[in-house]
């Protein structure tokens, strides 16, 4: 069994806003093993990107981490000084941001922007070493070497996205986060990029956190996964196990509302209602207003929302397991 | 890139012709017709009379006169100054132009860099106390009535404190027995500044190819030191040594105008830089740069400021035109006998040949500055660069 490369323990983060605290990350606990692909799924606004940003300690200025720890290869990231963090970023953990299309500075050549990252972490490399490294990465993601001398606006969306993947790999990080890397692309390119990431991940034995709102993509891409709702993880475990035996009502609904990826065709069910506002936190089960089959307990009482292990490595909200 | 430059130059030439013709028409439209007035002037020597008549074709129809004027312009033939006869306008301009060029290139470069630097720091320190105060000060100097402000500064620093000279462009006592003309010194100073900036630029360009950031920095630092040592030797040997006191005198007289115009002119650049840079800082690529572990200073300068520079340069290009009216005002206030004063006096005293010639030259000057700024903009923005290639 390979070791855990990233351990997130009881992480709590909120944004200070004029309307109050936006509780974007609540008691989030999960770990990622070396070489595994880990999925984070949930609808828009549930806090996926907030988790990703905190992993790199790049959350916006109004964000406050109230408690919890993030251990990357036994290094605690929460509370680390900025200068130490700079050494960790990209060298140990890199990210493909949600708006990866805009990840490129329009006035600097692609090659130079990758080179800049390598230079920062390997200051003694020669020019040739860096060029070779980029060239090797470009080969992996299927780009021509001439792209190095191009400016971002000269590339198509798909090419930019491939280059972003090369950028993320440029310092051989221990773990890569991909935050909805395909959102801005058309369907055909999306598929290509997904395959590319999958291929790279397997080829390099990469530890990957893949974030998406699309549970079908998560099924395709990941070994283990976590389902997020309103800032909390409501269910997590091996992807196969969650798909075959979803425990939480929200997970079930997510699966039923997605055109079937595995197994027989089911009738699609719509996921009604709005996600709850995260301002000033929530009591009890956040999903109860939208839950198709809440038990009486769920609505009234203050419930124990901690996760419970159902089967080997598969965890879900305690109350939901009990009442469902 | 080359194609772009050629195209812009051609456009400039067209604009210049339009400018030339319309400036002629403007002078032609002066009540009482400035050109014919020339001939009625009793001070005009008889041999000049014939010359003026021929030069401007005053006995010919308008269209031919315009043609003649354009042709004469390229021959550099503007006739004679009426006030400084037998000097030609070209001679007068040759004497005045370097002074204006010197003052205004220094002022513009200093003002632009100060403005850009302050704007950059303001955006970066957003929300801090110092940001608020500097912004308020900038808004003040951006909106202040310039002639009033310049006079106040002149009164304070020149009269009250007595730090800087008033009402003179040079100390005549000093120049009285000078072995050379002030213009020689001017030309020399301009050349010096030009050479130094070219060396700087070359050093910068060459070191860009060096991969290691620290050795890049070291080499740039060394080149700076070399320039300092080089300039020291230059000014302390041979010909330059004997000219040094005079150059110093000119430089001393330049301080106050440069300071005042900079205070007034930097604010526009600073405020615009602040706004655009604050927008740029929200961009995803800034976040990516931070995620890459790049230092704050490098993110500020290389990623944010570099991109924020584009709209700032655009607006700067447009303000270059104001050099013309700016130079008239500034030179008048600081008694700087440059093109602006020449133009003003010539117009006031109806020295039409000089007025027209200097007007055209200021126009050429503004157009050239425009062209240079335009080309450097296209160099800064790769998106324009490429479009022009395809
Ligand atoms: N800087 C901020 N200040 C205040 N609230 C914020 C800030 N950033 C995000 N939020 C809020 O925090 C919540 C979680 O946002 P987040 O971007 O993490 O969601 P997400 O799951 O990534 O959504 P999406 O799928 O749309 O990317 C949202 O309600 C969002 O409005
Ligand atoms: S705890 Fe109850 S209300 Fe909440 S999702 Fe589960 S079943 Fe529905
Ligand atoms: Mg997101």
Image: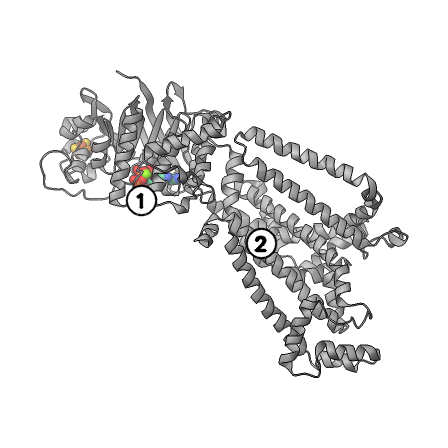
Furthest-top residue in this view = A1
Query: Crowding at label 1, few (<14), some or many (≥20) Cα neighbours within 10 Å?
Result: some
Same chain for the residues under marks 2 and 1 in the image: no
Q: Secondary structure at mark 1?
A: loop
- State the residue position of label 2: B373
Q: Secondary structure at mark 2?
A: helix
The image quadrant in which ligand 3 is located:
top left
Residue A271: x, y in percent? 18, 42
Residue B75 lies left or right of residue B240; in this view the side is left
- Viewer-closest of B89 and B51: B51
Residue A16 in view: yes
- Disc 1 is attached to a residue of which chain? A
- State the residue position of label 1: A184
Query: Crowding at label 2, few (<14), some or many (≥20) Cα neighbours within 10 Å?
Result: some
Q: What residue is at 74 percent from the left and 78 percent from the top?
A: B54
Dividing the picture into quadrants, the one containing residue A75 is top left
Q: What residue is at 47 percent from the left and 48 percent from the top?
A: B382
Residue B128 lies left or right of residue B167; in this view the side is left
Give the Cα distance between marks 2 and 1.
Answer: 36 Å
Residue B303: x, y in percent? 49, 40
Residue B316 in view: no
Residue B35 lies left or right of residue B309; in this view the side is right
- Disc 2 is attached to a residue of which chain? B
- Viewer-closest of A108 and A34: A108
Tell me the quarter of the image containing the N terminus of chain A. top left
The reply to whether callout 2 and callout 1 are in contact (CB within 8 Å) is: no
Q: What residue is at 59 percent from the left and 54 percent from the top?
A: B372
B222 to B65, vertically: above or below:
above
Residue A230: x, y in percent? 27, 36
Residue B53: x, y in percent? 75, 80
B170 to A264, vertically: above or below:
below
Please count the marks in the image: 2
């Amino acid at each position: 069994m390979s070791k855990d490369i990233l351990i997130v323990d009881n992480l709590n983060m909120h944004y200070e806003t004029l309307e109050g605290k936006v509780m974007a990350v609540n008691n989030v606990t999960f770990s990622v093993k070396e070489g595994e692909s880990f999925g984070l799924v949930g609808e828009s606004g549930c806090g996926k990107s907030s988790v990703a940003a905190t992993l790199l300690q790049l959350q916006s200025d109004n964000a406050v981490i109230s408690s919890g720890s993030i251990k990357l290869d036994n290094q605690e990231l929460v509370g680390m000084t900025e200068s130490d963090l700079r050494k960790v970023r990209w060298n140990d953990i890199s990210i493909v941001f949600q708006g990866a299309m805009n990840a490129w500075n329009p006035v600097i050549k692609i090659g130079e922007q990758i080179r800049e990252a390598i230079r920062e972490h390997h200051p003694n490399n020669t020019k040739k070493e860096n060029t070779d490294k980029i060239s090797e990465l470009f080969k992996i993601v299927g780009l021509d070497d001439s792209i190095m001398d191009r400016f971002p606006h000269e590339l198509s969306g798909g090419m930019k996205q491939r280059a972003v993947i090369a950028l993320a790999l440029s310092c051989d990080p221990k773990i890569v986060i991909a935050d909805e890397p395909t959102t801005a692309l058309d369907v055909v390119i999306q598929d290509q990029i997904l395959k590319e990431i999958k291929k790279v991940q397997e080829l390099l034995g990469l530890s990957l956190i893949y974030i998406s709102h699309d549970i079908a993509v998560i099924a395709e891409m990941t070994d283990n996964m976590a389902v997020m709702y309103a800032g909390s993880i409501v269910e997590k475990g091996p992807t196969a196990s969650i798909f075959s035996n979803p425990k939480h009502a929200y997970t079930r609904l997510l699966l039923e509302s997605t055109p079937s990826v595995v197994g027989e065709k089911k009738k699609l069910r719509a996921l009604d209602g709005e996600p709850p506002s995260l301002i000033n936190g929530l009591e009890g089960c956040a999903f109860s207003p939208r839950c198709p089959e809440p038990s009486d307990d769920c609505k009234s009482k203050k419930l124990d929302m901690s996760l419970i292990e159902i089967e080997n490595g598969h965890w879900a909200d305690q109350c939901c397991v009990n009442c469902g | 890139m080359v194609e772009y430059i050629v195209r812009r130059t051609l456009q400039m030439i067209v604009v210049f012709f339009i400018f030339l013709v319309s400036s002629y028409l403007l002078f032609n439209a002066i009540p009482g017709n400035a050109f014919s007035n020339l001939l009625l002037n009793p001070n005009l020597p008889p041999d000049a009379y014939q010359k003026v008549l021929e030069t401007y074709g005053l006995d010919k129809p308008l269209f031919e006169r315009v043609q003649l004027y354009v042709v004469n312009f390229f021959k550099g033939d503007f006739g004679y100054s009426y006030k400084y006869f037998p000097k030609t306008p070209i001679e007068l301009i040759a004497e005045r132009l370097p002074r204006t060029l010197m003052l205004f290139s220094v002022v513009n470069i200093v003002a632009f860099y100060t403005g850009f630097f302050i704007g950059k720091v303001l955006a970066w320190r957003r929300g801090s106390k110092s940001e608020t105060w500097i912004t308020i000060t900038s808004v003040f100097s951006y909106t202040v009535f310039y002639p009033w402000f310049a006079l106040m500064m002149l009164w304070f620093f020149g009269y009250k404190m007595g730090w800087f000279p008033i009402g003179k462009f040079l100390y005549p006592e000093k120049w009285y027995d000078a072995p050379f003309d002030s213009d020689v010194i001017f030309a020399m100073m301009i050349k010096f500044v030009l050479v130094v900036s070219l060396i700087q630029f070359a050093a910068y360009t060459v070191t860009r190819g060096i991969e290691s950031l620290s050795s890049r920095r070291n080499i740039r630092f060394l080149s700076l030191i070399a320039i300092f040592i080089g300039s020291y030797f230059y000014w302390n040997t041979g010909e330059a040594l004997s000219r040094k006191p005079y150059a110093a005198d000119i430089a001393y007289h330049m301080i106050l105008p440069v300071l005042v115009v900079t205070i007034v002119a930097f604010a526009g650049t600073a405020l615009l830089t602040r706004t655009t840079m604050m927008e740029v800082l929200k961009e995803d690529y800034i976040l990516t740069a931070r995620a890459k572990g790049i230092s704050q200073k490098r993110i500020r300068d290389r990623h944010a400021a570099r991109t924020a520079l584009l709209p700032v340069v655009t607006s700067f290009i447009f303000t270059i035109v104001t050099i013309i009216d700016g130079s008239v005002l500034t030179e008048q206030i600081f008694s700087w006998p440059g093109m602006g004063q020449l133009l003003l006096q010539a117009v006031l005293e109806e020295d039409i040949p000089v007025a027209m010639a200097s007007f055209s030259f200021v126009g050429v000057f503004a157009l050239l500055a425009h062209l240079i700024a335009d080309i450097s903009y296209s160099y800064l923005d790769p998106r324009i660069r490429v479009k022009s290639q395809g």
